[in-house]
Amino acid sequence: MTTARTPAGPLESRDSTPTPVVADEDLLLRRRVREALQTDRLPPRAPDRTWGGPGSGAACVICERIVSPDEVGLDLEYEQTGGTVSHPAHARCFLALETVLRERQLPPKAAAMPVPLRESE
């Protein structure tokens, strides 16, 4: 039986119940993301497409725990030479991936300072 997947936004959630954030677990997930990027389990960029729906029962590419059908699962799709590669992930693990990728794109503080405009001649 195939379950339909729908596109999901980066932080989209269908559950309105607030989930407490545990800082230590978030730090651990970001460390796992960095390991996945360093070992080439994930490309060092955002996915080309992200699909959400019930978990597929496959292991999450980041935390390596099963994304069970009673959880919201995401499929992270990357276009690569030879076709599309899809990686299952938990929503929280995907959030950690986004956080790490965003951290890597931040410029140094000195570079973030405004540059004065030159007057036109």
Image (spheres, rainbow, N blue to C red):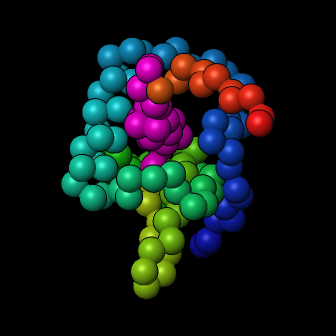
**Where is 86 relative to 39, above or below?**
below
Q: Which residues are magenta?
A: 89-110
Location of the N terminus (image quadrant) = bottom right
Q: Position of residue 101 (x, y in %)?
A: 45, 40
Q: Position of residue 4 (x, y in %)?
A: 69, 65
Is residue 96 something that shows in the picture? no
Is-magenta flag for residue 96?
Answer: yes
* Of residues 47 and 29, the one drawn nearer to the viewer in this rendering: 47
Taking the image as shown, residue 62 lies to the left or right of residue 106, namely: left
**Where is 62 relative to 49, above or below?**
above
Q: Main secondary structure of the magenta part?
A: helix
Taking the image as shown, residue 37 lies to the left or right of residue 101, namely: left
Q: Position of residue 104 (x, y in %)?
A: 40, 37
Q: Quadrant of residue 80?
A: bottom left
Is-magenta flag for residue 36?
Answer: no
**Where is 91 relative to 69, above or below?**
above
* Of residues 79 and 121, the one drawn nearer to the viewer in this rendering: 121
Q: Quadrant of residue 65?
A: top left
Is residue 38 something that shows in the picture? yes
Give the residue at the far front of this rendering: 121
- The residue located at (60%, 60%) in the rendering is 49
**Where is 20 relative to 14, above or below?**
above
Location of the C terminus (image quadrant) = top right
Q: Position of residue 5 (x, y in %)?
A: 67, 61
Taking the image as shown, residue 24 lies to the left or right of residue 9, namely: left
Taking the image as shown, residue 25 lies to the left or right of residue 116, namely: left
- The residue located at (64%, 65%) in the rendering is 3
